[in-house]
Amino acid sequence: MADHQPPSAEAITNGVTSHPTTQIAADTAAQHDLLPKLIPQLDRHLIFPLLEFLSGQEEEAGLEITKTKYELLKTTNMTDYVATLWQEINDSDEIPEEFSRKREEVLQRLSLFTEETSKIDELLVNEEVTSKLRSDKVANLKFLEQEHGVTAGMVDLLYDYGRFQYDCGSYQNAAHLLDQFRILSTDNDKVVSATWGKLASEILTTQWDSVMEEVNKVKETIDTKLFNNPLAQLQHRTWLIHWSLFPFFNYEPARDLLADLYFSPAFINTIQTDCPWILRYLAAAVITNRSRTKNTSQYQKQLKDLVRVVRQEGYEYSDPVTDFVNALYVDFDFEEAQKKLGEAEGVLKGDFFLSATADAFVESARHLISESYCKIHQRIDIKYLYPSTHPLLPASYCTKHHNRDLSARLGLNQDEGEKWIVNLIRDTRMDGKLDYQEGTVLMNHPANSVYQQVIERTKGMHFRTSVLSAAVAK
């Protein structure tokens, strides 16, 4: 028990970790490192995998990271591992007496907890007993007290034992005990704490299905039990946003669910108010979601919302990832977008949560650059760009972008550029055709008639008017 240690970065990310491949990429990642902003929002056990990842990024800072791990875990019950860290820091083969003494104390407390909770633990795994339990916790406690001699103090021991196991690094046992405690306890504050503890335990054991169940329970608790305390709601939502990053980028089925959660009014307001740096992760999720989602309208809505929020929060927070979104969709500056994409790749590879998605991000971002470029130009040379006088662009823009190498813009050679454009037109179903002899792509941008534009803009007017009338009537 005392010899447990927190999981490594590879254990959390299924062994998929990446590192900046050049010194420039490493410097860019270090310049935009979010670790100082993430650490205050995470439990100490959740911080450990991030430090492990950092030690792989900055080998020359190994001793400082080891000292940080020691300070992080020295108050826990993982005495053997903490002693090992002390030996590394002090370059010693000897272990101080205080570690051996604390180890004995941990083992004694473990034995005592096991003995004191054995009765109630056996009852709660007995199907004959659990089948008689109902949703009313008060009635359940009364039943267990009358029939089996269970007291409220014995229930509280489950909570204390669960926390003890968590501090020992025995996260699976901690999750089991805290879940049992929640079944019976009527102490709302401790039940909320137990829910957070179970969420952390499930994250550290990478039980992602259970993690998502706990995320929903925490969200429900925030909405229902803290509704009269806006400041507490803000803080708890901030914590949940940060803790949810673990399943967000390590569990594929959670990606859409958590993206919807982050874009919900309450949570996007929390991000804008308390943690705008989360926009990096939201932008990465939306952009990489391009090739995954089957719901085009939902993706376009998320992309539109992302652009709006990134634009609004530009004064508060920016990094190469958000700058890429701003350059492409706000400024329509393709050269700047390509520049920021190169920087963003280094930032993502240096981020614990995003390192495994760096390649997918670059691939999807290239698609978005090409798609946006094709939408605002009518004639594109595979090797050189000859933008026409598109009605959405001034002539100065077209002159500025004359004779730019498209392949270089995407980081591809000319042959790869041709295949890229063909695949893009096919995948996005854009109205365009490729002339291999001329080496050009002709895009068809039929202009909507004025009548059609009026119809499109007014077709939802009746519904919106009805909603507004109903709101005023209240």
Image: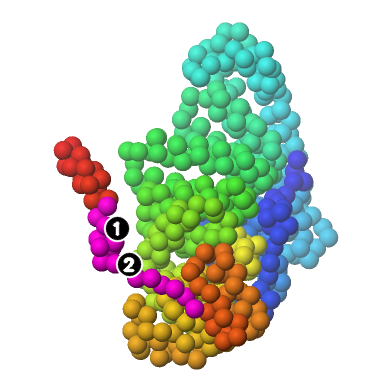
Quadrant where the C terminus sits is top left
Most foreground residue, 171 or 72: 171
Earlier in the chain: of badge 1 and badge 2, it is: 2
Confirm or deny contact between disc 1 and disc 2 (CB under 8 A): yes
Most foreground residue, 221 or 339: 339
Spot the residue most to the top: 147
Is 337 rendered above or below residue 80?
A: below
Q: Residues within 10 Å of mark 2 (few under 14, many from 20)?
A: few
Spot the residue most to the left: 473
Most foreground residue, 403 or 110: 403
Mark carried by residue 128: none
Gap in Å between the C-alphas at discs 1 and 2? 10 Å
Is 5 rendered above or below residue 348?
A: above
Most foreground residue, 129 or 335: 335
Q: Is residue 340 left or right of residue 414?
A: left
Q: From which residue to which does the magenta span run? A: 442-459
Q: Residue at x 46, y 70 (%)?
A: 325
Q: Residue at x 47, y 82 (%)?
A: 379
Q: Could you tell me which secondary element the residue under label 2 belongs to?
A: loop
Which kind of residue does numbered mark 2 sit on? Asn
Q: Is residue 467 left or right of residue 138?
A: left
Is 239 rendered above or below residue 425?
A: above
Mark carried by residue 448: 2
Mark carried by residue 456: 1
Q: Residue at x 53, y 16 (%)?
A: 134
- Taking the magenta stretch, the answer to whether it contains residue 456 is yes
The x and y percentages for residue 365 are: 54, 70
Q: Could you tell me which secondary element the residue under label 1 belongs to?
A: helix
Q: Residue at x 76, y 63 (%)?
A: 88
Please identify the quarter of the rendering in which residue 391 is found. bottom left
- Taking the magenta stretch, the answer to whether it contains residue 326 is no
Q: How many marks?
A: 2
